[in-house]
Amino acid sequence: MTHTEIETLHQKICDYILSRHLKVAFDKLGNLIESLQSGEWMDRKREQETAYQYMLQYMMEGADDPEQLKIYNQLRVSAMETADLVREQLMLQQVSSPLYARKNILPENYEIILELDSHNANVSLAGLLEESLNTEGKSMEFSKNHEKMLSDVFNHFWLTEKYKEKEVELVHLIFENHDIEISDKCVIISAITLSLMRTFDEKKFEILLDIYNETNEQLKQRAFIGFILSVYTYNRRIQLYENLVNRIRSLAHDNTFVQNLQVALLQFVRSKETEKITKKLTEEFIPEMVKISPFIQEKMNLKDLMQDENLLSDKNPEWQEVLDKAGITDKIQQFAELQMEGADVFMSTFSSMKHFSFFNEISNWFMPFTNHSSVSEALKKENQSGLLESLSKNYFLCNSDKYSLIFGISQMPENVKETIGHSMKLESEQIEEIKKDEELLAQSTKAEHISNQYIQDIYRFFKLYRRKKDFKDPFNTQLDLYNLFFIKEIEDSEKLLRTIGEAYFNKDFYDDAVTIFENLLQKEEYNVDLNQKNGYCYQKKGNYEKALSYYLKADMLKPESLWNLRKIAFCYRSLKDSEMALKYYLQIERQKPDDMAVQLSIGHCYLEQKMYDEALQVFFKVEYLAPANQKVWRPIAWCSFITGKLEQAGRYYQKIDENERNHHDWINLGHVTWCFKDRKNALLFYRKALESMNYDVNSFLRILKEDIPLLIENGINRNEIPIFLDKLRYEVDK
């Protein structure tokens, strides 16, 4: 079986169990085990199925067992855990993935603790020895040995399916030791998260929740994000574990937990627009910058400016004018605002900078930005030690991108390195000033930055890691974190959901917004704002009937809302109910009698109801109020033709500039001219129509056939029509 086949079958088994179809699940589990060809696993499956059959028989005999549900759920848990382990065995046996070759046997716990604990002391001692003995390399050797050990520990925690006492004890030893670096602990949290997302394990959940109680914000936020992603992965399954559920429910009443949850959910909402932002940058912003770049260089005389730094502070107002006219200023402002709210605006910049060898090691994707040996080598080589400190203080770049920037700088020309170093130093100083003004960042703000950066690190791993196909990417799923089972336990869950729903709404994710708003409307049925916004979501999704139902409810709750009346009228028009649309447009007209868009809509409603004289009156009113409005000429001309006012129709069609005429204009002008018996010019206008239609004769004839009753009504002899059309065909053949 392939990797995909194994994963698909395993997922089906779990889905059947969670949907309470155990007979089907056991049959599918048998199929999975047959691929493994293991009698031991087949015996375990038979034992579980036999226990289930005994339970069924006991029930059929009429026995009332108060423990039945508990036993039933235990069987479901056991069956899924068997499926987990069989899947893992199949992966090891049949999938040729180098990831599984990373499984290793760890040294004893005390050896690991000794290495992680003594790292700082070893590096410091090596530094002193290098300085006193004038030698190099010992501290780097210690660092690399330490990183190798950390990588092995990461792989073990990541690739171990079910944690035993050794893993649990090791985690506690590591996190209780205050001498072990925070960065090491952060990496281990990521390993546990990856492992849990791959294979369900109650112990891993317990570990993440234990770490969440740490005082260090880095550890707390990493564990929390790992916990959220893991609950999302097993949102139904986890509810079978009573002790775990009770612990999570107790957390749901903690204000700090709820605040962290809101921050995380909002950042995950932003992550859904990362691809859209990246596309906008690569397809709109960057091409515009490239296009205008030569002009900017010439206008701003950049070469001379770079030679005199003093001139850089003397800004020429013409420079801003150049950017304004090109539309660059507005785009920069848009992306600056996105950046300030925490959106991932750097994905496009750094996505091509993950080819460095540093990123070959999975653990490094989750490494907080620190003085890693690879960084030390780059900084030492380039003599840019100040850059490390500057980047460490940068809240807008995630850790992964900071590493990319360091490695990228080492390959840049010297003058570019100096410019970047200078820029980073200035930015660092600005951040320091902000921190002083705010008396350091508030704890909640600090937590938000850590959370946002870590989510962006995770996003990059799943999107950019060279073997990303070996992982199930949560960002490729619905990622409907608002459906996490424990949210309903939060005291003011409606307030949280409203905040998340508004975020989806403002980012144009209408499917998610609808789900949340409809949930809220079950308790707030008469909330005008929710009804209007839910209606708007359905409108943007193209479901006008649903949209209308919510708009009408909002209108009942708050009559005469101009915005709402416009939406109701629009939906009726979209549903081809011009009579009801007209009713609401007339209501709008009472509030906005001189609104041209409303008048045009009223005219079109009359037109659709074949009330041509009324339509003409409205269109003439529009022309009188806005003589420059050329959009009204077409409906005036058409209504005039239909009502037999041929001269008036011809006059208005002729007013439309030839370059602005579409094929309908040419056809209708041909109709009017033909009705005046000017067959030569009518033929000319029809040929113009065909020309604008790329000589699509069938489409042309379909339009003309629909208009035949109007032609006859305006004096064209029915028998003349086929003869005239044949003449047109001959002309086209020429």
Image (cartoon, helix red, strand yellow):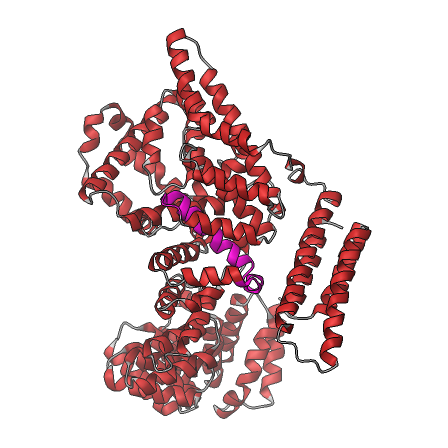
Does the magenta portion include 416? Answer: no
- Residue 491 appears at what percent x and percent y? 36, 68
Which quadrant does the C terminus fall into?
bottom right
Residue at the (44%, 12%) spot, across then down: 136
In the foreground, 729 or 520: 520
Residue at the (48%, 46%) spot, across then down: 458
Q: Main secondary structure of the magenta part?
A: helix
- Residue 406 appears at what percent x and percent y? 42, 30
Q: In the image, 160: left or right of 9?
A: left
- Residue 436 appears at what percent x and percent y? 19, 40
Q: Is residue 560 visible to the viewer in this orientation of the structure?
A: yes
Q: How many tags in the picture? A: 0
In the foreground, 634 or 537: 537
In the foreground, 279 or 67: 67
Range covered by the magenta-colored residues: 214-242
Residue at the (55%, 79%) spot, across then down: 703
Q: In the image, 167: left or right of 441?
A: right
Q: Is residue 76 above or below residue 439?
A: below
Q: Is residue 288 above or below residue 376?
A: below
Q: Is residue 669 above or below residue 559?
A: above
Q: Is residue 326 visible to the viewer in this orientation of the structure?
A: no
Residue at the (42%, 24%) spot, across then down: 376
- Residue 103 appears at what percent x and percent y? 65, 37
Does the magenta portion include 237? Answer: yes
